[in-house]
Amino acid sequence: MRKVMLLVMLALGMLIPITGSLSAGNPKSPEGIWTGALDIMGNRLRIVFKVTKNPDGGWKTALDSPDQGARDIPVSETVVRGDSLILQVAVVRGKFEGLLNAAGDSLTGKWTQGGISMPLNLSKAESLPVTTRSQEPAPPYPYVSEDVQFHNAAAGIDLAGTFTRPSGKGVFPAVALLTGSGAQDRDETVFGHKPFLVLADHLTRSGIAVLRFDDRGTGKSGGNIRNATTLDFVTDALAAVDYLKSRSDVKPERIGLAGHSEGAIIAPLAASRNGDISFLVLLAGPGLRGDSLLFLQGEAIMKASGTDARSISKNREIQKRLFAVVETEPDTAAAAQKIRGLLEDALKELTEEEKQQTGFSAETIPLQVRQINSPWIRFFLTYDPVKVLEKIRIPVLALWGEKDLQVPPAQNLPLMQAAFAKAGNKKADLRVLPSMNHLFQTCSTGAPSEYAAIDETFSPDALNAVSGWILRLP
């Protein structure tokens, strides 16, 4: 569910300086574009620092994370001392320290954050790196594309997105796309891929209008995502439906929602509250209750990463204790104290090797307490999607990737199937697509570590399954 995002995973707290002295004998300038990559649990995340010298002799730097769609993150302090470069990034509590080589074209160093230090070697580049995926469309498009804004009256915020429709006059069936969990932009950018851009492009070329939008507090959308829960995102989805209803080029009786991962929880909740939603597309949608899903997801991903059975069992036991606190202690201050105690006890049980492997340290505990005790997790852990699915009687297409480790179909499809049967919904079409992962990429193992390495953003078979089903609706 929650995506492995650089700015989430690494915003862990205290800084650890690189040991050893830094030479001061290299006169080469660090000005320019510097590129490198971090290895985060098998995921390669590219890092770009753009270092410029001000007219007054001072320095200014910005950070890009291309694989996360993050641009121009401010670097709070740039220090140049001889052949060393020190960059403090306060917004993510991160720090880079590196040594410039004699030629002035590489920096050997480390990225430190939250008690975790990892190698980060940078090379000087002539231009900014460009991630080009073979499926990613580029303008001019053979359809109408416009940036739009719409209002969520329930939350008092404006949301920004892109509306696309086939060229020419007419009214078209329309669908609003709902992203997975975490702060997502309108393209659902992750690991250098833009799944919703590819999906919207395919659907629009097929004759379907599409609205995709930045999550609240993300991109150009207003609001604050930090304290939001799934129920808040439901009001955003309903605002998107209202916007589509207001357009003269959309068929009001053919408006649907397509949600991915958490979006596939949001979509049925929205449909249960609004009779104007005529169909649902659920991509990698959970049937399991939140805590059960996270247990299953953690075990599946750890197995795929080669983690031994003892460590998997230990992780599961820690999860159970932490989740039990959140689910039984309504007072967030008291819960935070209990969670901190459990994490401190768990840390004592780990070997030094396990600490290195997991990045778990005393410095990471404060952020983990905040994350586990957050409003989003508090809602998600006890939410059972089946109870809402049992009320859905409109047409539903539910798709899973056979090798999805985040929402495994073997455990989630049967629950959804039973829910629709109880609802008497004979218009529900549930399918497992072979050799696909959580992002609907054709894959080998389904592990998240593959996401960035796969060129394909969205399997054509999955794209055709969605468009074909929508177009066949009466």
Image (cartoon, rainbow, N blue to C red):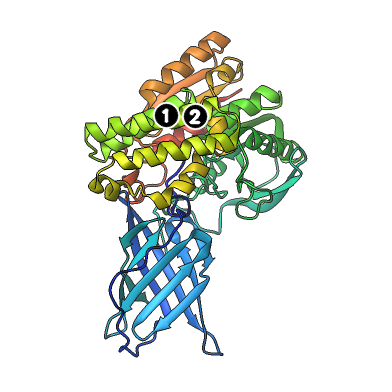
Give the residue type that dot 2 points to: Val
Quick check: 268 above or below 57?
A: above
Q: Nearer the viewer, residue 62 or 400?
A: 62
Q: Residues within 10 Å of mark 2 (few under 14, many from 20)?
A: many
Mark 1 to mark 2 CA distance (whole Å): 7 Å
Question: What x and y, as percent, mark residue 391?
Answer: 61, 15
Residue 127 visible in the displayed image: no
Q: Tell me if residue 365 comes above or below residue 139 in the rendering.
A: above
**Residue 408, image x and y in percent?**
37, 28
Q: Which mark is residue 333?
A: none
Query: Taking 17 as reference, is 251 left or right?
Result: right
The foreground one among 449 and 111 is 111
According to the picture, the residue beneath numbered tag 2 turns out to be 325
Instruction: Estimate how packed mark 1 is, as few (under 14), some (14 to 19) or many (20 or more) residues with alpha carbons within 10 Å.
Output: some
Label 2 residue SS: helix
Residue 253 lies, in percent from the top left, at 70, 27
Q: Residue at x 35, y 80 (%)?
A: 84
Q: Is residue 332 left or right of residue 287?
A: right
Residue bearing mark 1: 321
User: Mark 1–mark 2 contact, CB under 8 Å?
Assistant: yes
| Residue displayed at 29% across by 47% down | 355
Q: Quadrant location of the C terminus?
A: top right
Q: Quadrant of residue 413?
A: top left
205 up-or-down from 87: above or below: above
Of 272 and 345, the residue lying toward us: 345
Residue 256 in sight from this viewpoint? yes
Seen at 70% across and 44% down, the residue is 169
